Image (spheres, rainbow, N blue to C red):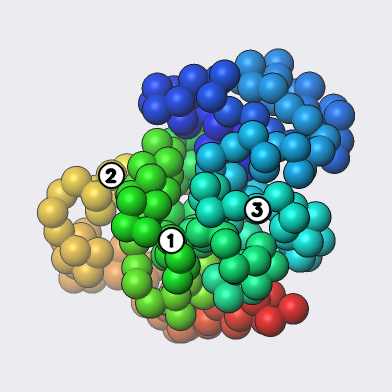
Amino acid sequence: MAGALIKGLLEAKLYAAEDMAVSDALPAQLRKVKRQYGVEGMRDNTRLVQTAQTVVLSVKPQILDQVLAEIRPVVTKKQLFISIAAGVPLARLESGLGDRARVIRVMPNTPALLAKGMAVVTRGKRATAKDEKLALGLFRGVGEATAVKDEALMDAVTGLSGSGPAYVYLFAEALIAGGSRVGLTPKLATQLALQTLTGAAAMLQESGYSPQQLREMVSSPGGTTLAGLARLHKGKFTDTVVAGIEAATRRSRELGKA
């Protein structure tokens, strides 16, 4: 996700390579970022924080507390911290960074790699409206972004848009498998499935119709689409997707308490 953000910011010309720096424990990863984006790197987190105005905490939730403890001694009121660690609440971030930290919490998703991401932003008690605007600007460089005041919504955001791309990928796998079962070659089934998803997404975003209206428009009485939909309903397709989002939301809450 950090690489996606760097790529998007450079392509949107919001920042130049010399305006950014990264830290990573792996020298190979630092060389990769330098080679791909021209952004300098270092292995010292505290040094990076000391030289930055905005710090994006792009680490896994399981190691975040360790990173917070490491950089806490060099945190000042001048820095803005933006965390994209899934499930980690603002209170935990602010406690780990100390009472001087301005913190924004963000839940992005992986389509940011193609500047098609969706991010939701919420700000901590010391972050300002200006800080929120800056964070929104960063993530609008790699897709769309919106702000919410109620942090409690962030776990649901994680369950839907944060994890959502994986649900779509699984559906794509199912479409390809179904096409193959009824006689299509894997290559043709893949082409049909991926373009169908692309076209359907464009219709959802650009037609002005709701998902229900679009579904009804292609569901002729006694036709093939209704036959397929009836089988999906029999298999509790909608209930299963809803249950998946609920499960991801619960896991996000669990990560926040870890």
Q: Which residue matches tag 2? A: 202
Going by the numbered disc 3, the residue's amino acid type is Val
Q: Which residue matches tag 1? A: 127
Q: How many marks?
A: 3
Reply above or below: 130 against 66: above
Please name the residue shown 45% across and 25% down the image.
15
Marks 1 and 2 sit apart, C-alpha to C-alpha, by 36 Å
Instruction: Residue 52: tell me if it is visible.
Output: yes
**SS class, disc 1:** loop
**SS class, disc 3:** loop
Disc number lying in front (2 or 3) = 3
Q: Which residue matches tag 3? A: 75
Reply above or below: 77 against 90: above
**Marks 1 and 2, the one that precedes in the sequence:** 1
Indicate the quadrant where residue 19 lies. top right
Going by the numbered disc 2, the residue's amino acid type is Ala
Disc number lying in front (1 or 2) = 1
Does residue 94 appear left or right of residue 60 in this picture?
A: left
Instruction: Residue 251: tell me if it is visible.
Output: no
Could you classify mark 1 by the number of other residues whose Cα lies within 10 Å: few (under 14), some (14-19), or many (20 or more)? some
Identify which residue, 151 or 3, lies in the foreground. Answer: 151
Q: Are marks 1 and 2 in contact (CB under 8 Å)?
A: no
**Marks 3 and 1, the one that precedes in the sequence:** 3
Quadrant where the C terminus sits is bottom right
Identify which residue, 160 or 241, lies in the foreground. Answer: 160
